[in-house]
Amino acid sequence: MPILICQNHENYGNSSDYYNVSYYKSDSNISTVAQINQFLSNLYSNKIKRILRSQQPNKELVVKNVYNLVSSNFAENIQEADNFLVFFTKDNCLICDEHKKEFYELADYMVKEANIIKFGIIDGLGNELEDLKIDTYPTVILFKTG
């Protein structure tokens, strides 16, 4: 099955160009102009879903009271708690690394003292989410399901 690669040219030249790329997969073989036109028509009418980037899950799901999240386990873990605080980070981000330490300390303290909230961390660049686009790192979001 062919995969169509689309780049957002608004941000062309940005140092994170690699992450402005979206991937779409055709349900059938595309070998004619008519099939390309049909594929693009389906794409523009949102009949074709993006292929989401996802890293492999860590061997240890929870480290120091913080869940290691990836695209493939994100929704499942978020839905298991009434309150889930997620830290979105990216590689080579010094301010992310500084705040990550504080996030782990907060998680450790809150779980020991109250245990009313779960904590998670996810590499926002390596893991795309269906309905959530993070453009600034670090970002912290509280998900409430209850």
Image: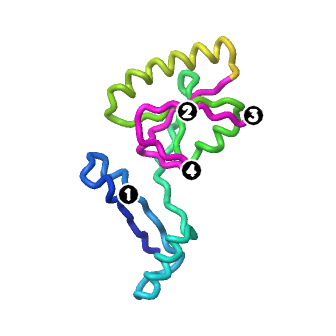
- 1 to 69, vertically: above or below: below
Quadrant of the image containing the C terminus = top right
Q: Position of residue 9 (x, y in %)?
A: 32, 59
Residue at image position (55%, 67%) is 46
Indicate the secondary structure of the residue bearing disc 1: strand
Classed neighbour count for the residue bearing mark 4: other residues with Cα under 10 Å, few (<14), some (14–19), many (≥20): few
Which residue is identified by label 2?
Answer: 141
**Disc 1 and disc 3: Cα gap in Å?**
34 Å
Q: Amino acid at mark 1?
A: Val
Which residue is identified by label 3?
Answer: 146
Q: Position of residue 10 (x, y in %)?
A: 33, 56
**Disc 2 and disc 3: Cα gap in Å?**
15 Å
Residue 92 falls in image quadrant: top left
Which residue is identified by label 1?
Answer: 21
Q: Position of residue 134 (x, y in %)?
A: 46, 42
Q: N-terminal of the two: label 1 or label 4?
A: 1
